[in-house]
Image: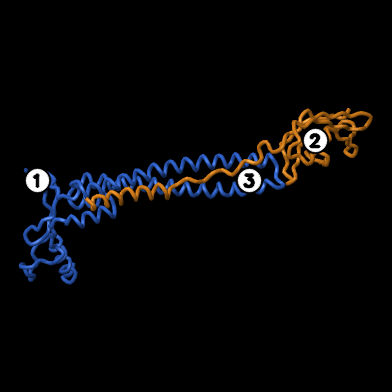
């Protein structure tokens, strides 16, 4: 390996490991190694929870609650939106059958009308099922969102939480690192 | 207190909006075909001296403006005749082939003023001796 290529590689490794680089000032480490350890403001956490349930709880340290809310709300939204799309599809199909059924009134036959009627009833059953599903999951999503709002507005959802054991970014020597922190309150 | 009430109203309003936005107001159209026309009953066919006579009974003549007679041979080919007078209960057919060994399936149905065909009668099978 030539010295021309080995110098940048050495610098990269030193920077990555957080070791002091010869010739660089030890007083002010590069900005990318600066670690923000400031608590998140309640108002910002509330805004985050308003944008998506669980985010405000996550940034204030309520990891279990925040993660559960994010995952649950995402799942509820997926089922809700899927059943809503199904509902729209069934509605369009029902409209097509309805047009056909009404057209058969003039010049059609009982057999054709009966077949179309049965198809319409099947579509209507599908439509009602999709509606029930989307209402159920829509209300569940709304309920979870509401609880999330209640949690951050009135309960302790955005109070800073201190977990007993956590991994936290720390400045170690001249570089960055991760520390396993245990708290004994 | 007002702030608290506003928050409650916002949450309740969101839920109400969801319920209204997801309303299911789709209904089936009015059923027009069930019971609109009655199916002819007791369809019988008699072949006497080379003349075919078909007889039937209508349970009700409500909405009926005519009747269609259908003759289907063993190949599936269908020949139809229209009976303009809905009060008739018989029809004499003398144009279809009544060669020996021929088989005809005869059906009947009512028609209304919009040209809608009612339910078909039970089939009567004619076997020419």
Residue B81 shows in this picture: no
Residue at image mark 2: B74
Residue B14 picture location, percent across and down: 34, 50
| Element class at badge 2 | loop
Residue B100 picture location, percent across and down: 89, 31
* Number of residue marks: 3
Q: Is residue A127 toward the left or the right of residue B123 in the image? A: left
| Element class at badge 3 | helix
Q: Nearer the viewer, mark 2 or mark 3?
A: 3
Q: Residue at x 15, y 70 (%)?
A: A3
Palette colour of chain B: orange
Could you tell me how far apart the alpha carbons at marks 2 and 1 are, in whole angstroms? 92 Å
Q: Residue furthest front?
A: B2
Q: Chain of mark 3?
A: A
> Which disc, if any, is residue A101?
3
Tag 2 and tag 3, C-beta contact below 8 Å: no
Q: Residue furthest right?
A: B49
Q: Quadrant of the C terminus of chain B?
A: top right
């Amino acid at each position: 390996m030539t010295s021309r290529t080995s110098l940048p590689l050495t610098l990269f490794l030193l920077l990555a490991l957080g070791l002091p680089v010869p010739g660089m000032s030890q007083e002010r480490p590069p900005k990318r190694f600066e670690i923000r350890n400031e608590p998140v403001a309640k108002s910002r956490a509330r805004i985050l929870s308003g944008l998506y349930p669980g985010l405000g709880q996550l940034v204030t340290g309520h990891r279990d609650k925040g993660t559960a809310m994010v995952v649950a709300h995402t799942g509820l939204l997926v089922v809700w939106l899927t059943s809503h799309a199904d509902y729209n599809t069934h509605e369009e199909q029902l409209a097509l059958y309805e047009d056909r059924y009404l057209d058969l009134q003039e010049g059609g036959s009982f057999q054709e009308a009966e077949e179309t009627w049965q198809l319409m009833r099947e579509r209507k059953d599908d439509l009602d099922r999709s509606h029930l599903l989307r209402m159920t999951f829509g209300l569940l999503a709304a309920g979870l969102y509401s609880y999330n709002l209640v949690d951050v507005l009135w309960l302790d959802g955005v109070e800073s939480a201190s977990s007993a054991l956590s991994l936290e970014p720390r400045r170690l020597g001249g570089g960055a690192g991760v520390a396993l922190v245990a708290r004994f309150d | 207190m007002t702030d608290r009430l506003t928050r409650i109203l916002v949450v309740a309003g969101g839920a109400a909006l969801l319920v209204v936005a997801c309303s299911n107001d789709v209904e089936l159209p009015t059923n027009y075909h069930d019971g609109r026309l009655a199916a002819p009953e007791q369809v019988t066919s008699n072949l006497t001296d080379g003349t075919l006579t078909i007889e039937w009974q209508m349970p009700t003549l409500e909405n009926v403006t005519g009747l269609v007679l259908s003759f289907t041979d063993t190949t599936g080919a269908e020949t139809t005749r229209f009976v303009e007078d809905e009060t008739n209960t018989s029809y004499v057919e003398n144009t279809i082939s009544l060669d020996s060994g021929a088989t005809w399936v005869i059906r009947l149905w009512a028609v209304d003023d919009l040209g809608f065909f009612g339910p078909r009668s039970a089939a009567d099978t004619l076997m020419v001796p």
